Image (cartoon, rainbow, N blue to C red):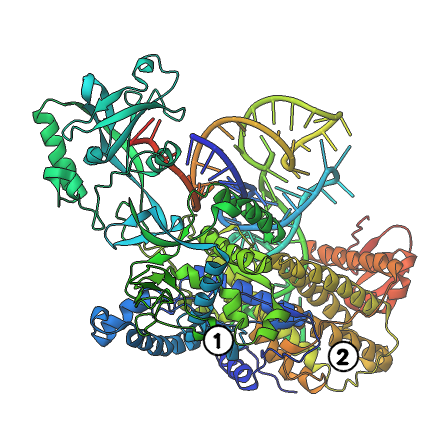
Amino acid sequence: MQLPKQYDFKESEKKWQKFWDKNKTYKFNPKSKKPVYSIDTPPPYASAGHLHVGHALSYTQFEIIARIMRLLGYNVYFPPGYDDNGLPTEKYVEEKLGINKAKTNRAEFRKLCLEESKKVEKVYTENVFKKLGHSYDWDLLYQTISPESQRVAQTAFLKLVKKGDCYKAKEPTIWCPYHETALAQAEVENLTRTTKLNYIKFGNDLLIATTRPEFLSSCVGIFVHPEDKRYKKLIGKEIEVPLFNHKVKVMADETVDPEFGTGIMMVCTFGDNADIEKWKKYNLDLRISVDREGKLNELGGKYKGMKLEKAREEILKDLEEKELLEKQEELQQTVGSCWRCNTPVEYIVTDQWLIKTLKYKKELLKRGKEVDWHPKFMRVRYEDWVKNLGWDWTISRQRYFGIPIPVWYCDKCHEVILPEENELPIDPIQVKKKCKCGGKGVPDEDVFDTWMTSSNSPEIALRWLEKPEQYKKLAPMSLRPQSHDIIRTWAFYTILKSHLLFKRIPWKDLIINTFVLDSKGHGMSKSKGNAICADDLIDKYGVDVFRYWVGGANLGSDLPFNEKELIAGQKLLTKMWNASKFVIMNLEDFDRKKPKLEPIDEYTLLKLEKTVKNIKENYIKYNISMARKLSEEFFWHTFCDNYLEIVKDRLYNPDKRGKEKRKSAQYTLYHSLLTILKLFAPIMPHITEEIYHLYFDKKEKEKSIHISEWPKEMKITKNKLEKLGDEFIDVISKVRKFKNENNKSLKEPVKLTVDKKLSIFLDDLKAVTNASEIRFGNEFKVILNTNIVTTNT
RNA sequence: GGGCCCAUGGUCUAGUGGUUAUGACGUCGCCCUUACAAGGCGGAGAUCGCCGGUUCGAUCCCGGCUGGGCCCACCA
């Protein structure tokens, strides 16, 4: 049999990717009796940019798991998805089509987004997912912008409203003055900045330090520590606020730090979270002086219409003029800011839809414990987040584009008008509704937070509403793979929704992907300019080598990028190609019948079986790197370095050694190589498929190695043999070392003295060491023809 | 300010309460051996970050420190 001398990865990748596509190799079979393993895949936003290694790694990491589970006998439900319901899509469509979304209608614009996204996604599918050798079932593709996804989000909303877990409220909400929208707690980032702490004279010459003098008009209370001797007598008194001259009460609260500033805290509605807390706790007045654009309103008096920054300047100027500004100090401060525009957030009172979270903290913690986190310590992040929640989840956004909130408000009785579930998806702007009282329904023009959709990804992926039977059977899903930075959003909201809607967890396992750092140990990002492009690596080394690297990463931990790892993978591929070539060449006349096995062949199969078992255990625990290591060890050392060398003589000289002994070697080679290929198949799908098709596909029943069965146990249990075999291998190693130390070729003939126990391997031992004579004795000896050298055991 | 993770030969990495502490890349030496010189075989190279504690015994458990990475937080 003529086999190609070298493995051409580029050609092989193209060939097999096409093959898998054409044959729908990875199609989910709803009729199969195998247990189902379902994956709640993270839908990426299909960008045209280059593929960052970090992303390529995280997506490939759980893709390897999909392959592992398929190989272990599961019916794998592995749907690809695209997240095209966000701002990036909006922007892209506006720019590409040269339209202004504010001038088209919402439904029309959404349709355009859907169409454009589909085009971009098609390119992405080919250039990223298929190129990486991913085994999605493309018939299960979903989009978060699709009508079906909208229906899921709106149905979930409706159910929660009816249940009372979703409500409309006039509440202080986190507000981005730039985007003019409410934000969820999870959308707030921290911004560290230097600011001025201003010491301002209030009535009675009381000195109060504040960083937000622009909020003087909103001041509703003064707080001191109850034990602070300086101010004890003030408690209960009223103090006049400078410039605005309204009076506020002095109160005591233990959270006030006497050491900070002057030990007096001014509470305004609302400068920050602490204000809201005290406002609620002490039932203070509401004096809102900031509008939706971040400008002062009527309450701001002469500062009305000024942006907060400007108002601050003016107020400070006026305070100074009136000699009410005692002093200013520099202060390092951390403030919340909008995650998109970095504008510091404000807190204003608006009408918003919220989903209850605070009420369910305990249950959510319990649900968190029901999920199997990999690694375990990542659950702590979830728990910390849940414990520290301070707000219910604001799900309405004052944005133009997104999934509409399906409600109307009666213009007469002001009741909320809800649609029927079977009307969904619906855009209230497009559809008129009447109230029971006869009043006209005014549509809610807000849209959902995008997490409102994403948090139902299991429902979208499993076709909750389209295929209720399937959903019932497959939920909860088996696995959610995701990155650690969205534990507080994606993981949290999904668990929340699942708890509220279905009273159970959304999936059994949650894995946190590896976080790739640059070679110096810093996070990779475009802005830092240290991001490495996965496409370049794939062009240079091939996908399987890239995937080999991915297979060495551990879940939930950091991994500095190191190109050397790829070289190791490259070498492994070469080795695998060559070893397979050798094996297949020697299997031409193999009839697959089981012959009487030689002791060393049995020993090798025994070792293999142990390895397979061990690997399975690791694979099930998502310990891919350990499985890879074990596979490599067996393949390279046990199989190539030792076994292949041992059987060469039997394969080459059947006349001398006996035909049956050659068959025994062939049998062992066949099963070992096939098993080795399967063990590596999830990590390196292309080369293993290529080799499988060089020979095995004609013998085995499956068309593709990737849907073949996990190696069956051969039930070899000869423990004595294992010990003896180990000793035999040890002798080989010693003889090699001996020849090496004497600068001799490995072919150099020697005379050996070995333990009598090893006599069962006599012929193989003789052949592999090229011994002209073997004697038995207690002491191990190697002797050259010319000079005599002895080695002891 | 709180919390989490990490620290092992030059580099990257595995691992365990107790034998000579993995493996890879690199390096050095030997070997053209009919699968593979993009190879084989062998060698050198680590007081397992630092300081304490628990223990008969710690790289592994506990506490502290240092350095790196990350998450969270209302000091007005």
Q: Residue at x 60, y 54 (%)?
A: A371
Label 2, secondary structure: give it. helix
The image quadrant where one finds the N terminus of chain A is bottom right
What count of labels does the image hold? 2
Q: Chain of mark 1?
A: A
Residue of label 2: A652
The amino acid pointed to by label 1 is Leu
A685 relative position to A527: left or right? right
Q: Along the horizontal axis of the image, is A95 left or right of A648? A: left
Residue A25 location, quadrant: bottom right
Asked whether residue A313 appears in the rendered view, the answer is yes
Q: Name the residue: 77% across, 61% down.
A: A610
Residue A60 - label: none
Q: Quadrant of residue A584?
A: bottom right
- Residue A538 drawn above or below residue A654: above
x and y percentages locating residue A740 in the rendered image: 68, 57
Q: What is the chain letter for disc 2?
A: A
For the residue carrying disc 1, how many other residues have a C-alpha within 10 Å: few (<14), some (14-19), or many (20+)?
some
Which residue is painted at 69% across and 61% down in the image? A615
Residue placed most toward the observer, A652 or A680: A680
Residue at which label 1 appears: A141
Q: Earlier in the sequence, mark 1 or mark 2?
A: 1
